[in-house]
Amino acid sequence: MVTSQIPVITIDGPTASGKGTVAHRVADKLGFHYLDSGALYRLTALSALRRGTDLNDEHALAKLAEHLQCSFQGGDIILSQENVTDAIRAEEVGNTASKIATFPTVRHALVGLQLGFRKAPGVVADGRDMGSVIFPHAVLKVFLTASVAARADRRYKQLIGKGISAIMEDLLMDLQARDDRDTHRAIAPLVPAEGAHVLDTSNMTADQAVEQVLQWYAAVGKPH
Ligand code: CDP
């Protein structure tokens, strides 16, 4: 199949909107590949934190991004032969990811890696700019949202479930700061892509959201 015919479903949205869970399950149901683009920003952030790279040095950060030695193996994320699946989920790493994601050259350095996930029979791409920048011709674009309270609650449970301690007040503040940065940055800001279906999941289970996305996909069908 030529690359331009491989179906892409983009699922963008703010932090802790449930994108990851929904995108993952949709990919499983359809037998598609899954791109967790946020993980690439987190991997760059983790690399930078570990090496002590100056977080204001855009050039050095872009170089790190460009030369990331990472692979996705089933549910595991490997960085330079180390399993960092849990390490990249730490709040410090997420906050650093959101800061370095404001640098155009860092974003640019990660484009090729993201496009490489478009493989047959299809890909579900999860992030902030999947439908607006990386895959503007996606067959289906979804923008998932949820109230700040619902998202903080989900993030709290997610962290506690992984044995990572968390304080609700801090999470709320971090979440709002991250929303603010992601929405107001000059490059690839977090906005629904043109033509995206907006889905508010505040009062929905993940399964209901998955069902809705699958219904939309069935309605648009496969391209060509
Ligand atoms: O888990 P959460 O939704 O908080 O974050 P993530 O999807 O793992 O992404 C971490 C950070 O990377 C986000 O706060 C964004 O600033 C940035 N990011 C981005 O700029 N563009 C993407 N396509 C994905 C993530």
Image (spheres, grey):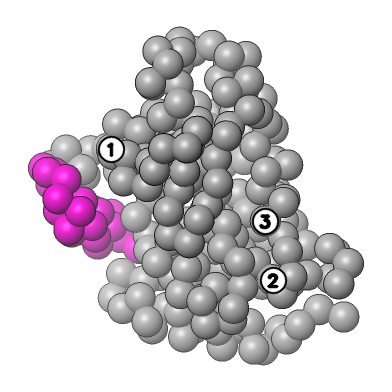
| CA gap, disc 3 and disc 1 | 26 Å
Q: Is residue 34 visible?
A: yes
Marks 3 & 2, CB-CB < 8 Å contact: no
Q: Is residue 210 above or below residue 63?
A: below
Q: Amino acid at mark 2?
A: Gly
Task: Indicate yes or no whether the magenta region holds residue 163.
Answer: yes
Q: Quadrant of residue 66?
A: top right
Q: Main secondary structure of the magenta part?
A: helix
Q: Quadrant of the C terminus?
A: bottom right
Quadrant of residue 146 within the rendered picture? bottom left
Residue at 42% from the left image edge and 16% from the top image edge: 51
Q: Which residue is mark 2?
A: 122
Give the residue pinned by disc 1: 91
Crowd band around label 1 with a 10 angstrom C-alpha radius: few (<14), some (14–19), many (20+): some
Residue wearing tag 3: 117
State the CA–CA distance, disc 3 to disc 2. 9 Å
CB of residue at label 1: within 8 Å of ligand 1? no
Query: Is label 3 within 8 A of ligand 1 (CB to nearest ligand atom)?
Result: no
Q: Which contiguous range is marked in magenta?
A: 146-168
Q: CA distance from mark 1 to mark 2?
A: 31 Å
- First along the sequence among labels 1 and 2: 1
